[in-house]
């Protein structure tokens, strides 16, 4: 019995040591998985920025496999799938996101694009509204502006011309640091709006980007069209 009592402390120490080793291994594995997920996600972002959508999707899948609970990775994968035309699969991931976070602006934007591509315009309009009323990470500002552009065009397509043009002109006013999206919005107003609305859009654009000769050319054409319309 004395021998057994002598072994009790040894066994206790061994058990504690085993628990410490196991806990350390678990923490190490979690840290390793998190690191792999971050690297794969960063790779996906870089590939997407280069227009290599299919490769970006592979990287995002890898990131999600290493960190299945990451909402940002699930959103990125869903959006990349939608951009690549894989609407059904992309919508599945994005629907998971909005179930977990109903205020995700990027996820609702992706669902709006799916609905629009499939001809469900009224549903797309509702999704766009939820998207623009939702929360957007600072790094997603360019996509948010794209959502506003698409929303304005969709409203005009649905017969809500004045509402759509108002959204587009507001976007031009608030995109003084982004000539690309502002120019696209002005072009959209020129295509769907009245000559007066087109003139207003390019007038704002000329104030924001006075060094662009094409802006002045379009403004001049818009003014001529507006004068002819007024006669």
Image (cartoon, rainbow, N blue to C red):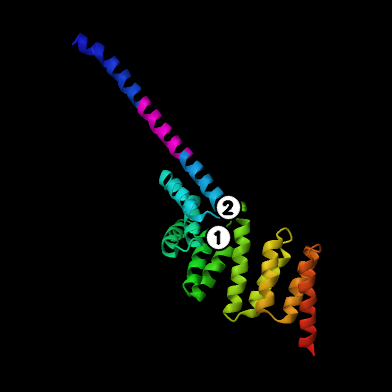
Count of all numbered marks drawn on residues in the image: 2
92 and 102: which is toward the camera? 92
Residue 103 visible in the picture = no
| Of the two numbered discs 1 and 2 in the rendering, the one whose residue sits closer to the viewer | 2
137 and 204: which is toward the camera? 204
Mark 1 or mark 2: name the one nearer the start of the chain.
2
Q: What's the magenta bit mostly, secondary-structure-wise? A: helix
Residue 39 position (above or below residue 158) = above
Name the residue rendered at 77%, 68% in the picture.
Answer: 215
Q: Is residue 18 left or right of residue 160?
A: left
Q: Is residue 221 left or right of residue 70?
A: right
- Check if mark 1's residue and mark 2's residue have beta carbons within 8 Å: no
Residue 218 position (above or below residue 83) = below
**What numbered label is drawn on residue 219?**
none
Range of the magenta residues? 20-35
Q: Which residue is mark 2?
A: 49
82 and 169: which is toward the camera? 82
The quadrant in which the N terminus is found is top left
The quadrant where residue 128 appears: bottom right
- The x, y position of residue 78, in whole percent, is 47, 57
Q: Which residue is mark 1?
A: 105
Q: Secondary structure at mark 1?
A: helix
Name the residue rendered at 30%, 22% in the picture.
Answer: 15
- The x, y position of residue 25, in whole percent, is 38, 30
Q: Residues within 10 Å of mark 2 (few under 14, many from 20)?
A: few
């Amino acid at each position: 019995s004395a021998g057994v009592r002598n072994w009790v402390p040894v066994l206790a120490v061994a058990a504690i040591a085993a628990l410490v080793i196991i806990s350390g291994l678990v923490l190490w594995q979690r840290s390793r998985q998190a690191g792999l997920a971050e690297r794969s996600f960063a790779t996906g972002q870089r590939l997407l920025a280069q227009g290599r959508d299919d490769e970006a999707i592979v990287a995002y899948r890898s990131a999600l496999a290493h960190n299945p609970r990451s909402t940002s990775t699930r959103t990125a994968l869903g959006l990349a799938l939608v951009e690549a035309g894989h609407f059904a699969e992309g919508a599945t991931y994005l629907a998971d996101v909005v179930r977990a976070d109903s205020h995700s602006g990027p996820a609702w934007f992706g669902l709006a694009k799916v609905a629009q591509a499939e001809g469900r315009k009224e549903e797309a309009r509702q999704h766009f509204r939820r998207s623009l009323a939702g929360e957007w990470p600072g790094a997603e500002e360019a996509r948010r502006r794209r959502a506003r552009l698409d929303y304005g065009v969709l409203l005009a397509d649905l017969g809500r011309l004045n509402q759509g043009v108002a959204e587009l002109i507001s976007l031009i006013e608030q995109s003084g640091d982004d000539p690309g999206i502002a120019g696209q919005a002005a072009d959209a107003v020129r295509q769907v709006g009245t000559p007066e609305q087109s003139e207003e859009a390019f007038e704002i654009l000329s104030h924001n980007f006075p060094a662009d000769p094409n802006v002045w050319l379009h403004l001049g054409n818009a003014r001529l069209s507006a004068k002819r319309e007024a006669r």
